[in-house]
Image (cartoon, rainbow, N blue to C red):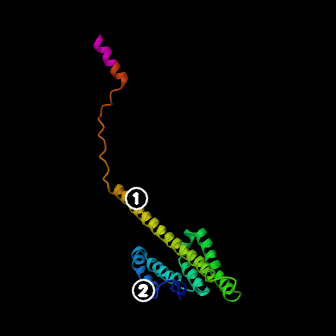
Amino acid sequence: GFWYVFCLIFKRFRLLFLFVFHAHVIIYVIPIHCRLGRFGRLGPLAACVAAIGQVHLFRAYPTGCDVACLLALLLVLPTYVVQCQQKFILLACVCMIGLGLCPTMAHAWLVWNAGNANFLFLGHLVHHVAGGHLLVTWLGAGLQLRRRRKWTKLMEKWVWGMVDEACRRPEAPAVQHSEQPPATAEAEGGRALKKRR
């Protein structure tokens, strides 16, 4: 599937590149699980969607079914999509346009003989860059929502802790009032006059 790259490399590196192209997707599983998969009830689902999206992005020849599957999986968590709504719509459209370029460019190259393999490579490049940016934007929205929920829970716990503490405090003892009224300025002035006489 990676014939364009294999045309450019030496034969002795063919197995190395073949291994790297097919095995590097496994490397991303652990960081995605640590960052998303172990948090909350939606974490494992988000990690699964991200892993399937990566497999789709690293395919050599994407099809319409791949894009439909990716978009359907990203829409499973609508709160993430709402968080990045404007970018999501734009990138989904660019991803579909890139996918539409692939058969057009292949036809121009192979049937009309009006181009070369770079035309097909351009269609794939547009599709993969837009799809990758779409997945990263979706993951960023999920992380932002998780961070917001974490801070909301923390602040809620802090406020309720303060309320509980204020409710548990014993009331301050009442101030004892003496039976004699406090001395006022008029009374002080009258005493000063008596001392002078």
- In the rendered structure, find residue 16 and report the number of the disc placed on it: 2
Q: Is residue 189 left or right of residue 120?
A: left
Residue in view at x 62 percent, y 72 percent: 89
Local crowd at mark 1 within 10 Å, few (<14), some, or many (≥20)? Answer: few
**Where residue 7 appears, x then y in whole percent?**
53, 86
Q: Residues within 10 Å of mark 2 (few under 14, many from 20)?
A: few
Query: Tag 2: residue type?
Result: Leu
Which residues are the magenta region? 190-197
Which residue occupies the foreground of this view, 62 or 148? 62
Is residue 136 at all visible to an observer of this figure? yes
For residue 160, which quarter of the picture? bottom left
Q: Residue furthest top?
A: 197
Between tags 2 and 1, which lies in front?
2
The numbered mark at residue 159 is: 1
Q: Amino acid at mark 1?
A: Val
Left or right: where 142 falls relative to 71: left
User: Which label sits on residue 54?
Assistant: none
Q: Position of residue 37 (x, y in %)?
A: 42, 77
